[in-house]
Amino acid sequence: MFTLNCKGRLLLIDRPVVMGIINATPDSFYSGSRQQSVDGALQKAETMLGEGATLLDIGGQSTRPGSAFLNEEEELKRVLPAVEAIHLQFPDCFISIDTYYSKVAQEAVAHGASLVNDISGGSFDAVMAATVASLQVPYICMHVKGTVETMHENPAYDNVTQEVLDYFIRKIAAFADAGISDIIIDPGFGFSKNSAHNFELLKNLEVFQQLKRPLLLGISRKSTIYKTLGITAEEALNGSTVLHTAGLLKGASILRVHDVKEAMEAVILTQHLRPGQN
């Protein structure tokens, strides 16, 4: 069980929870996640919350291979209207801002976000850790190797599970020293990793429970699923549910997903496999 302080509101994770993805982008790899208008974002938020999402993750920049790079001002123009509108319409929703820019994190929290989700683990912006510490919100730290330009190029590991675990041990200590109280870890499926690395991490996911931090699984509709099955991202819902189920059985606390209803069904059913459940 984990309790996270989100700007004075407590987020209790006493069973796995679902985070719905809302991308204020024209080029995210899965077209179903793209919401370029505020009305579209509101409608998507309403649907996801109605299906059981506890959190919504709003991002303005695609990080798929070959995506267009945005500076922080362009990213702000995309995400702030959606963050503010969703916060006003659904004030009880926990909103996460998906960004590696400290300025975007700061502005988004001022407009209603209550978590920061950083794919770079603080490595793309030198003042991200200090900014999040000053905001006093939970921080989702993802594992990645390289830069924005190189993170998808020919990843190599001697032991991917051990390297990612060591990375989090270092990062958790550094962020705690910086004053960040609540840290969520994300192994970074699809970032600086090929399909073999992703499956190896998923097979060993229970290793990360020793860190005693909430574990986020972000594998929904990714290429590890659709390329392995020889299909497209649009056809990868069933495959996503299979790997979500595997992740839940190995200790995932948060599922970051495009499809909330199916993810919630996986959460509910796997809960019945736990000791003491009928």
Image (cartoon, rainbow, N blue to C red):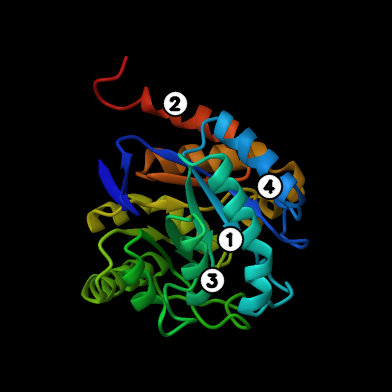
Which amino acid does the dot numbered 3 rest on? Val
Q: Is residue 77 visible?
A: yes
Asked whether disc 3 touches disc 2, contact meaning CB atoms under 8 Å apart, the reply is no
Which numbered disc flags the more N-terminal residue, 3 or 2?
3
Helix, strand or loop at mark 1: helix
| Residue underneath mark 1 | 195
Of 220 and 175, the residue lying toward us: 175
Which amino acid does the dot numbered 4 rest on? Ala
Which numbered disc flags the more N-terminal residue, 2 or 1?
1
Which amino acid does the dot numbered 1 rest on? Ser
Asked whether disc 2 touches disc 4, contact meaning CB atoms under 8 Å apart, the reply is no
Q: Marks 2 and 1, how far apart in space? A: 28 Å
Horizontal and vertical percent position of residue 255: 48, 45
Quadrant of the image occupied by residue 138? bottom left
Asked whether disc 2 touches disc 1, contact meaning CB atoms under 8 Å apart, the reply is no
Q: Residue furthest top?
A: 278
Horizontal and vertical percent position of residue 2: 27, 45
Which amino acid does the dot numbered 2 rest on? Ile
Which numbered disc flags the more N-terminal residue, 1 or 4?
4
Q: Marks 1 and 4, how far apart in space? A: 31 Å
Q: Marks 2 and 4, how far apart in space? A: 26 Å
Q: Marks 3 and 2, how far apart in space? A: 34 Å
Which numbered disc flags the more N-terminal residue, 2 or 4?
4
Give the label on residue 268, or none: 2
Give the label on residue 104, or none: 3
* Quadrant of the snapshot with the C terminus: top left
* Quadrant of the snapshot with the N terminus: top left
Q: Is residue 153 visible?
A: no
Horizontal and vertical percent position of residue 151: 57, 77
On screen, residue 29 above or below 273: below
Q: Residue at x 55, y 35 (%)?
A: 49
Give the label on residue 41, or none: 4
